[in-house]
Image: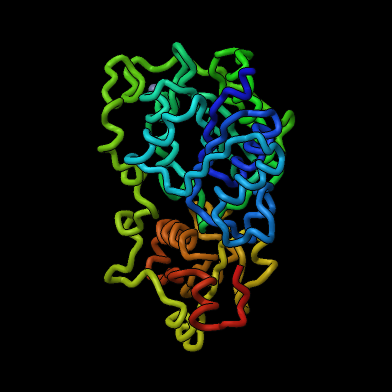
Amino acid sequence: MKLREAKVVVVGAGGLGCPALQYLAAAGIGTLGIVDHDVVDLSNLQRQILHREKRIGELKAESAASAIREINSSIIAQVHPVTLTSLNARDILSQYDVILDCTDNAPVRYLLSDSAVALGKPLVSGAAMKYDGQLCTYNLQPNGPCYRCIFPKPPAPELIGSCEDSGILGAVTGIVGTLQALQTIKLITGQHEQNASLLLFSALGMPPFRSVRLRQKRENCPACGASDGRAGAIEETDYVAFCGGNQPNWEARGLLPGPTGSRMTPFEVQTALSHAQWTILDVRSRAEFSICHLKDSINIPLQELAHDIPPTLPLGPVVVVCRLGNDSQIAASRLREARSDGENERIIVDMIGGLREWSKDVDPLFPVY
Ligand SMILES: [Zn+2]
């Protein structure tokens, strides 16, 4: 039986990995590898459906492995509780026939794609953010594109998601993860059409699914193209640097405190508020704002801040706040660029560390979320 002999590795035991593992286990895949270095957190449970309240604090890879053993006790569940890096990827992934990308981070996506090319294995890749999801199987033989063929350059770090977690509707990851399991089962049983396409899902779209036919691999792709240049270079590649670093590089973007002082700590903000007529501009979503906000602050979500000063913003100095202090830097920079000649003197700063830091340093009663 093909499914029982198959060996599949799922990288990421989170929102996508859990539903994928669940259906792969139920389908009777013989060996399932689980790669995840993280531990189960309460905030995971709305979408990472293999984890349980009683397992909070345990390794996700262990938690997921015990959950799938409960579904199917004959499964060999191999746990890899590590961060996948260019140094260990080949060793881990080479043990399996099909690789599932269930991660949410750009460096690992490129690392997985390059490794899949080097090892000649199909890569079933899923992604989800907010209401939208994507599914694609890369490196299909003989001519399927790899991830680099379609996305040669990583997106700017600030577009990948902001303020730690852009939020995800759990059912969206359920749909995409389940589709990843389906693609994998089709590959193993020889029922896959072997044509590469990118499936786009939007929970709010009508129709919710769209499929984009993908071209064959690019001849000049640095990973899978004719030159075959990268196959041996994975170990030497710094994937995090390739994707712009762990955190957006604010310094390079000119957003860190300069001589003009464009940022303030929560303490400095508190002092400033008591002396002058500052406006506090909160750029979080309306939903987050309605949960909690600073007294007298006004709310304009970052997405609605176009490249001019909103008419609702009172005159005088402005301090921009958000949850963790990243979106507020983008917003402050946008507002500074938007100042008209008459407004050049207007002070626009952002609060370092966001409202989370505010509740730590200034007001312990301010809700942390
Ligand atoms: Zn390629």
* Residue closest to the eye, 344 or 156: 156
Q: Residue furthest front?
A: 74
Q: Residue furthest bottom?
A: 275
Q: Residue furthest right?
A: 206
| Image location (x, y in percent) of residue 305 | 54, 55
- Taking the image as shown, residue 327 lies to the left or right of residue 204, namely left
Q: Quadrant of ligand 1?
A: top left
Q: Is residue 202 visible?
A: no
Q: Residue at 61% across / 18% down in the picture?
A: 2
Q: Residue at 41% across / 65% down in the picture?
A: 342
Quadrant for the C terminus in the image: bottom right
Q: Against 101, is 249 above or below? A: below
Q: Quadrant of residue 196?
A: top right
- Taking the image as shown, residue 51 lies to the left or right of residue 250, namely right
- Taking the image as shown, residue 245 lies to the left or right of residue 47, namely left
Quadrant for the N terminus in the image: top right
| Image location (x, y in percent) of residue 125 | 53, 31
Q: Residue at 60% across / 72% down in the picture?
A: 368
Q: Against 45, is 78 above or below? A: above
- Taking the image as shown, residue 28 lies to the left or right of residue 279, namely right
| Image location (x, y in percent) of residue 189 | 62, 16
Q: Residue at 53% across / 40% down in the picture?
A: 78
* Residue closest to the eye, 63 or 333: 63
Q: Is residue 184 visible?
A: yes
The coloring applied to the image is rainbow
| Image location (x, y in percent) of residue 103 | 51, 42
* Residue closest to the eye, 98 or 271: 98
Q: What count of labels does the image hold? A: 0
Q: Against 305, is 141 above or below? A: above
